[in-house]
Amino acid sequence: MTVQPLLSVRHLTTEFQLAGKQIARALEDVSFDVMPGKTIGLVGESGCGKTTTLMSIMRLLPASGRITSGNVYFNGIDLLTLSEHEMRAHRWKEMSIIFQGAMNALNPVMKIGDQIREAILLHNLMPRNAAEQRVGELLELVGIPRLRRDLYPHQYSGGMRQRAMIAMALACSPDLLFADEPTTALDVMIQAQVLELLKEIQKKLGLAIVLVTHDLGVVAEMCDDVVVMYGGKVAEYGSAELVYNQPQHPYTQRLLEAFPDLSRSIDSSTDLATIPGTPPRLNALPPGCRFSPRCHKSMEICTQIAPDLIAQNTAGNAQHLAACHLLNKLEIKNS
Amino acid sequence: MSAKPVLEVRNLFKHFPMRQSMLDMLRRRQAEVVCAVDGVSFSLEKGEVLALVGESGCGKTTIVRTLIGLEEATSGEILFKGQEVESQNQNEKNKISLKQLRQRVQIVFQDPYESLDPRATIFDIVSEPLVVHGMAANRDELHARVKMSLEEAGLRPAEDYLLRYPHELSGGQRQRVVIAAAMVLEPELLLADEPVSMLDVSIRAEILNLLNALRRSRGISILFITHDLGTVGHFANHLAVMYLGRIVEIGPTAEVLKNPQHPYTRALLSVVPVPNPKLRRKMIILSGETPNPINLPNGCRFHPRCPLAMDECKLNDQHLVDVGNKHQAACLLAQ
Amino acid sequence: MNENWALFKRNLFEFWKAFRRNKLGLLGGFLVLTAILAATFAPLLTPYAPTEVIRDVNGRGLTFAPPSVHAPLGTDDAGRDIWSQLIYGARVSLAVGFLAGFIAMFIGSLFGILAGYFGGRIDNLLMRVTDVLLVIPDLPLMLVLVATLRQMDLHVSPLVVLVFVIGLLYWTSTARLIRSQVLTIKERQYVARSRAIGAGHVHIIRKHILPQIMPLIVANTVLIISTAILIESGLAFLGLGDPTQPSWGAMLNFAFDRSAVTNGAWWFYLPPGFAIVWVTLGCVLLGNVLEDMLNPRLTAHHLESNQNMIAIQKREGE
Ligand SMILES: Nc1ncnc2c1ncn2[C@@H]1O[C@H](COP(=O)(O)OP(=O)(O)OP(=O)(O)O)[C@@H](O)[C@H]1O
Ligand SMILES: Nc1ncnc2c1ncn2[C@@H]1O[C@H](COP(=O)(O)OP(=O)(O)OP(=O)(O)O)[C@@H](O)[C@H]1O
Ligand code: SF4
Ligand SMILES: [Mg+2]
Ligand SMILES: [Mg+2]
C-alpha cells in the first residue's frame, strides 16, 4: 500500500520581475513530495530560493513574482488552478506558515495574546469568545503559560516569541506547516527547545512539516527527507539518511565537509573544506550546471548543459535523486 | 623561558547599574545591578586559541568590550603580557595605556553588516588603524601594507577591493575586510566575538580557516567567542564554558569535549546538531530561558535548570575545582 | 590623490545617474540653478540698472507703465524697470538666504554633533537653549531684534544685521535633527570598532560621524536657505530691509506702499511674489529629494527580518 503524498510540487518555476524589465528566474523545475506526518527539510545557502519556494506554494508571492509553470498538488488538488478565494480556504486552515523573521516583526504595542486572537478572527474561524479560549489552548500547546498572553512582545524572549509564532500558525490545526528558518537568530539551547517543540506538536497533531533552514545539522536532527537547493534548482533530493551518508552531488558533499562538526576528529591543524566562490546571482546565472563555477569536479559538459535530476540506485523504496553530470555518465556506462 | 601569558584576566567583574525610576529613588531602594560578568579569570598563551562558549546573554560580549576598554571593569585585573592595563582616563605608571593596548589587541565583531562604515571605502577601513596609530611613514607604505593585509585575508587581487564600498561585498567578504583591518597592525591578540555566526555554512568554514591560518603563520593568540560548540573542536586549544557571568568549566578543548564535567556543558554539547541522521542522540534540553543576570539564584547559579541538582546545590555557591588534566569545573559533582 | 579623484568622480556620477531619474529633484535643481545664474549674471540680463529711472522722450519718468518693449515687466511708481529690479533683487535675496543658511547650518551642526556625541552638559545646555528658542515665536522676536539692532548705530548694512539675526535664530532645528542622528550613529558597531582600534574623538567624528550626517546637513541647509529667503522677504516687506538695495521683499513693500494694488499695477507685485515662490519651492524640492537620495544604502540579508514577508502576511490577513 502506498501512501499518497500530502503535498506534491512538480516542476515549479517562478520568476521575478526586476527593475528595467529584467527577469530573474528564482526557481526552476523544483519538484518534491511531502508525506503526511513527515518532516522534509529545504536546505541551501542564502538566496537559493527556499523562501520563494514556500511563497510560491502558498501563492503569497509579491506582485513582482510570477509562477510561470509547474503544479502544486495538495491532497490531489492543483493549488495553482484555484481562484484566490478558493486558495484562501486552504491557507491557514490546511496549510500554514511561520514566516522568516516574523518573530522580530510582531506588533510591539499589542499584547501577544491579542495578536494571536486577531490572527484567528481575521480568518473568520470562530466567534470572539471561542477565539479567546483557543488562544489559551494554543499558548499551552507551545509551552507558554496562559497568563502570559497579556505580555507585550518585548517582554518575551526570542524563544518565546518564536513559540508564539508557532501557536499562531497552529490556530486552525493545519495538516501542513511551513517553518521558514524558525531557529536562525536563536542560540543553540533555545533552538533545541523550539525544535523539540515542533517534534512534539507533530507527534500530537500528526501534521507534516516543511522546515526551511541553512543549517545542515538542524535538518539532520529533524527531517525524514531533504531537498538540497542550489541557485533556484534542486541539486539533491532524497531520504535524509541517504543524502547525509551517501551524498551524490558535489555541492552536498562539499557542504557537508564544510560543516564544523563535533562528531569528527578534534584537530586544529587541518582546515575545514570550503566551497570557493559565491552563489550565483539570479540575473547572471552561469550556463550549464549552476554549480559548475564553484565545483571541484566540473567537466566541460557541466558548463554547457544543465544536468537533470536523476534517480540514484537505492536499495528498498527509499528515494534519492541528484542532478549532476558525473552521475549521469555512470548511468550511461552502466546501460 | 617562561614567557608571560599574552592575556591574563583575574577576577573580572562588570556590573551595570539599572536605571532607577524616580519612585524607587524616593523610596531609597537600592539600585538593581545587572551582573553581566561576575568573577571571571582565565589566561591565554601565545599562539593559542581560547574559546568562550555560552548561551546568549551570559556575558561573552561584555568580557570582550571590557578587555578592550570599551567598558570600564567594575573590579578585577587585566594583564597584557604581564603588564596591567590602565583603567579609563588615568595615566598610571607601569601600566600599559589603552591606546597602546588597542594597537596590540584587535577585535572582530559578530555582525559583518554592522561593523563596517557604509560610507568608507575598503581602503579607508583597512588603513584606519595605521592612520590612527601613525604607523605608516607615507602614502606608499600605507598602500603597500593595506594591500598586503587584504591579500593575506584572502581578498585577491587587493586592487579590486580598495575602492569598493561595504555594500558591494558579500557577508563573507565583509568579514574578511574586518579581519584584514584587524590584522594590519600585526596584533598579538585577536578578540573575535562570534565572527562566523552570521555567515552561511560554506563561508563560515572559510573564515575559520583564515583565522586558523593567521594563527599558524603569525603566532597570534585568539579569544574566540561563540555560542556554537560545533565550531570549537576544529579550532580552539582551550575551551571555557560560561553561564550567567561566570566560567563554569574550563580546560583543554579535547579534554572538555570528551569528558565534560559540568551538567551545563553536557547539556550544551548534547544540543549541538550533528549533521548525520544516524547519529541522533538524546538531547538534554534545559527548560526555561536564559536566566536574568539581575536576580541571581542562591547556591549554584545553575541549579534552577540543572537536571542533576541536589539539595546542597541550592545552598552553596560553586567555584572552579581541579578535576585533573588542567581541567576545572564548578559543580558539586565534579569534586 | 589620483584615485581619490577617481572615486569622487565615480560617486558623483552615480549620484547624477540616480538624481537624473528623479523628476521633482530635477525641477528643484532647475529652479534653484536658474535663480543663481540670474543673480550672478544680472548685469547681462538687464537692460537698466535697478535704480535707473526710465524716461520717455520728454524726459519724464515712465511711472506705473505696464509691460512693454522698453520695460519687459513694466515700471514702478518712480519709473524704474521691474525686470531689472527683480533680477538684481535675486542677488540680495539669495545672498541673505545663503549666508544666513550657512551660519545656521554651521552653528547647528557644531552644536548637534557635540551634544549628540559627548552628551552630558553640552547636551543639556543645547536642549535648554533650543527649548527656549522653540517656544518664542520667531517673527516677533526677529522684528524686535532687527529693529533694536538698527537703532544701535552699528555702521553695518541692514542686510548684515538680517543675515546674522536669521542665522543665529534658525540653527536650533538643525541642531536637534543632527543630535538625534549622531546619537544613533555613535551606537553603531563600526564606531565601537573604530574606538577599539584606538581612534580618538576627533578622528571618529571626522571619519565616521560627519560623512554619515553630511547628506542630512546638505539637505537641511537647502531647506534652511529657503526659510531664510522667506524670512528676509517678510522682514523686508515690513520695511526692515535695506531700502537702497532692491530685494524681492523690498519690492513688495514698495508695491504696497505706493498702492500698486489699488492702481491695478499687477506687474509691480506679482513678479517678486512669483520669484520668492520660485526659489523657495526649488529649495524645498531639492532638499527633500537630496535627503531621500543621500541616505546610506542598505542591503538586505537573510538573517534580518524580512519586511517584505511581513507585508505579504498583512495583505493576506486583510
Ligand atoms: N521580490 C523579489 N524581487 C526580486 N527578486 C527576489 C524577490 N524575492 C526574492 N528574490 C530573489 O530570489 C532569490 C531567492 O530568494 P529567497 O528569499 O527565496 O532565498 P532564500 O533561500 O529564502 O534565502 P535566505 O536564506 O536568505 O532566506 C534571491 O536571489 C532573491 O534575491
Ligand atoms: N550596557 C548595558 N547595560 C545594562 N545591561 C547590559 C549592558 N550590556 C550588556 N548588558 C547585559 O549583560 C548581560 C550580558 O550581555 P552580553 O552582551 O555580554 O551577552 P553575550 O554573552 O554576548 O550574549 P550574545 O550571545 O547574545 O551576544 C545581558 O543580560 C545584557 O542584557
Ligand atoms: S554537474 Fe558538474 S559542475 Fe555540477 S555539480 Fe556535478 S560535477 Fe559539479
Ligand atoms: Mg528565506
Ligand atoms: Mg554577544
Image: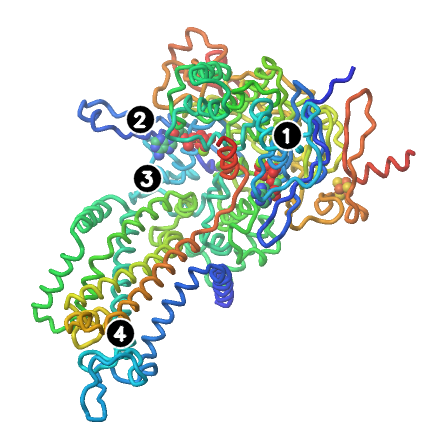
Q: Secondary structure at mark 1?
A: helix
Going by the image, does A243 lie left or right of B41?
right
Q: Residue B259 in the image: x percent, y percent?
A: 58, 19
Pointer 3 chain: B
Pointer 2 chain: B
C-alpha gap between disc 2 and disc 1? 40 Å
Mark 3 CB lies closer than 8 A to ligand 2: no
C-alpha gap between disc 3 and disc 2? 21 Å
Q: Residue tagged by mark 1?
A: A216
C-alpha gap between disc 3 and disc 1? 44 Å
**Mark 3 or 2 closer to N-term?**
2
Q: Are marks 4 and 2 in contact (CB under 8 Å)?
A: no
Q: Residue tagged by mark 3?
A: B87
| Label annotation for residue C267 | 4
Q: Residue at x 19, y 86 (%)?
A: C61
Q: Residue B28 in the image: x percent, y percent?
A: 19, 23
Q: Nearer the viewer, mark 4 or mark 1?
A: 4
Q: Is residue A211 visible?
A: yes
Q: Nearer the viewer, mark 2 or mark 1?
A: 1
- Indicate the quadrant containing the N terminus of chain A: top left, top right, bottom left or bottom right: top right
Q: Is residue B11 visible?
A: no
The kind of residue on which mark 3 rests is Ser
C-alpha gap between disc 4 and disc 3? 73 Å
| Label annotation for residue B33 | 2
Q: Residue B228 in the image: x percent, y percent?
A: 54, 29
